[in-house]
Image (cartoon, helix red, strand yellow):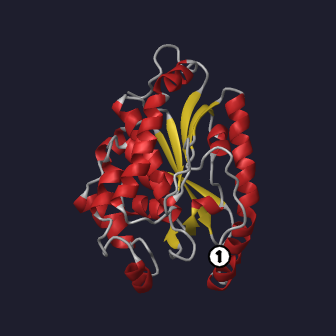
Amino acid sequence: MANGKTGLVLEGGGMRGMYTCGILDVLMENHIYLDGMVGVSAGIAFGCNYKSRQAGRALRYNVRFAHDKRYSGIGSLLKTGDYYNAWFAYHLVPTHYDVFDYNVFEDSPMECYAVCFDVNTGEGVYQRLEHVNDDFFEWIRASASMPVVAQPVEVGGHLLLDGGLADSIPLEFMMSKGYERNVVILTREEGFRKTAEHGMWLMKPLLRKWPKVIEALKKRPAHYNMQLQQVREQERKGNAFVFRPLTPLNVSRTTHDPKEMNRVYQQGRAEALQRLDELKQFLAKGNDEEPIANE
């Protein structure tokens, strides 16, 4: 590319991530593949399908297992400490029920990173995902393991939780990796500002073993709002193309309603199609010829 690499930055947000899936599926259908990507929580859990080129997969398996107690729910939380069952959701589904295409993923030259939070150091961990094995799925699970409703995940010599505790919108990380231009997919509408985390009174006693997590939760609103400002600044400079829901998604992070999942997914699709030409123009400015990379 003429002006450096173009990256993709995916915010989390639980089932708000269905909005992201809708956008990514439109990109895949139009053969738009960028040079690298980073995802946080649901951003990487769903976004990894972009590198494996499996449009529709994230919506498909979430709808299929929406009411399956083996996949998620209060029963799994009480029994295992994980709302999304670690073994079934992160290992059996991608290897047996809706198979993740590890060959395409590994053959793709696209760099792919998952963001996690080290509960002992309080630092972000940025893991490059290259080979699809048990650790690959554990890194993704760690990135999406929300405090209280998930147990810390031990992988790569770290004890990890949700990457959003460290870096909710890792645009700065991608820029540090040489991605001068980025497509950013947010799951909150324009004007959204994060306030104090809900339920801190409950989380404090439940997380007393992990003081760094409590500290990160307290700091998260200010850090998140600062990152939104950074995104706007890069957008103003012409270095970032930003998707934001045009209207609030108004969906629970853990919804079990397939209709709600599909509604949010279709909103992502519609907004991506509406701005497809605009996106191609943005990508063309950083490319000598076509606005399509790694195809």
Count of numbered circles on the image:
1
Q: Name the residue tied to disc 1.
A: 199
Q: Quadrant of residue 66?
A: bottom left
Disc 1 element: loop
Looking at the image, which residue is at 39% across and 35% down?
Answer: 26
Residue 158 visible in the current orientation: no
Residue 227: x percent and y percent?
71, 48
Q: Residue at x 52, y 14 (%)?
A: 288
Residue occupying image coordinates x 46% and y 34%: 272
Q: Where does the image place residue 33, in percent across and percent down from the top left?
A: 43, 32
The C terminus sits in image quarter: top left
Left or right: residue 101 versus residue 207 is left
| Percent coordinates x, y for residue 254 in the rendering | 46, 66
Amino acid type, mark 1: Gly
Indicate left or right for 84 with 127 as reference: left
Does the rendering let one see residue 254?
A: yes
Residue 214 at x, y = what percent?
70, 74
Displayed quadrant of residue 31: top left
Instruction: Tell which of 138 and 184 is nearer to you.
Output: 184
**Residue 23 to residue 198: above or below:** above
**Location of residue 165 with respect to 189 vertically, above or below:** below
Placement of the N terminus among the 4 image quadrants: top right
